[in-house]
Amino acid sequence: MTDAAAPIELFYWPTPNGWKITIALEELDLPYVLRAVNIGRGDQFKPDFLAISPNNKMPAIVDPDGPGGAPISVFESGAILQYLGRKTGRLYPADERGRVAVDEWLFWQMGGFGPMLGQTHHFRQYAPEKVPYAIDRYTNETHRLYGVLNARLKDREFLAGDYSIADIAVVGWATLWERQGQDIAEFPHVKRWLDTLLARPAVRRGLDAKVDGEKPLDLSSDREAQKVLFGQRARAS
């Protein structure tokens, strides 16, 4: 990373959604600093964080060198990826056809591959009681989504032409295929793509990004974290 610009502040915890942004920043060689948002202890509800991420979810960024040279904050991982792509002119095509292709697969991840796999994690790993219907429902939908991904990658190296923010959005979730109850051998084109991305140094650095004081959350036994993450309701403003 260069020292030419003031660093982007990334409000982060090491999850598949957080990894999207660390990977992108590493790939784009943008200077950044990590600001820990311990989602298991409720940091996402602190007023300072809500001021930049009103959905009380990380990641979020503050770019001190935003449009017109003025700072800008961006929340939602997909919006951050698009912003970084436009800012740098990299990993996000300038032509409309190319951009549409990237957006299709970026939104596929945001609307399906992330949320459905997250529910699979919840009911397979963290739910206090095993609910067979829920486990089957989300494991099967995850299997379907891997099939969609496999078909897309059958005759192309990356999801939307050249390597792009669409690939970056998907890769962190796809590394967790085993805990999602999937057999990667069923999806050989996904495996080839995943191996290709995991061989990229910037992807590895992004996946390995740590914050000070980080302790892995054991959501199967950490009752405080379960209450924070799985019992959220609207809070009075």
Image (cartoon, helix red, strand yellow):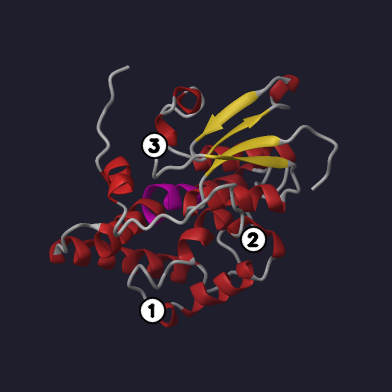
Q: Give the CA distance from mark 3 to mark 1.
A: 34 Å
Residue drawn 43% across and 82% down? Answer: 185
67 part of magenta stretch:
no
**Mark 2: secondary structure:** helix
Residue drawn 84% across and 40% down? Answer: 3
N-term mark: 3 or 2? 3
Magenta stretch bounds? 104-113
Instruction: Say if residue 162 shows up in the picture.
Output: no
Where, quadrant-wise, is the C terminus in this rendering? top left
Q: Of helix, strand and loop, which mostly describes the magenta segment?
A: helix
Answer few, some or many: residues within 10 Å of disc 1's Cα (few below 14, many 20 plus, some between 14 and 19): few
Query: What amino acid is at disc 3?
Result: Gly
Q: Please state the horizontal and vertical placement of residue 22, each as a whole percent of the image.
A: 62, 49
Q: Please state the horizontal and vertical placement of residue 76, each as a whole percent of the image.
A: 48, 37
Query: What amino acid is at disc 2?
Result: Val
Residue drawn 68% across and 66% down? Answer: 200
Whether residue 66 sits left or right of residue 56 in the image: it is right
Residue drawn 30% across and 45% down? Answer: 224
N-term mark: 3 or 1? 3
Residue, far bottom = 185
N-term mark: 2 or 1? 1
Whether residue 129 sits left or right of residue 144 in the image: it is left
Residue 183 has which mark? 1
Give the residue pinned by disc 2: 203
Give the residue pinned by disc 3: 42
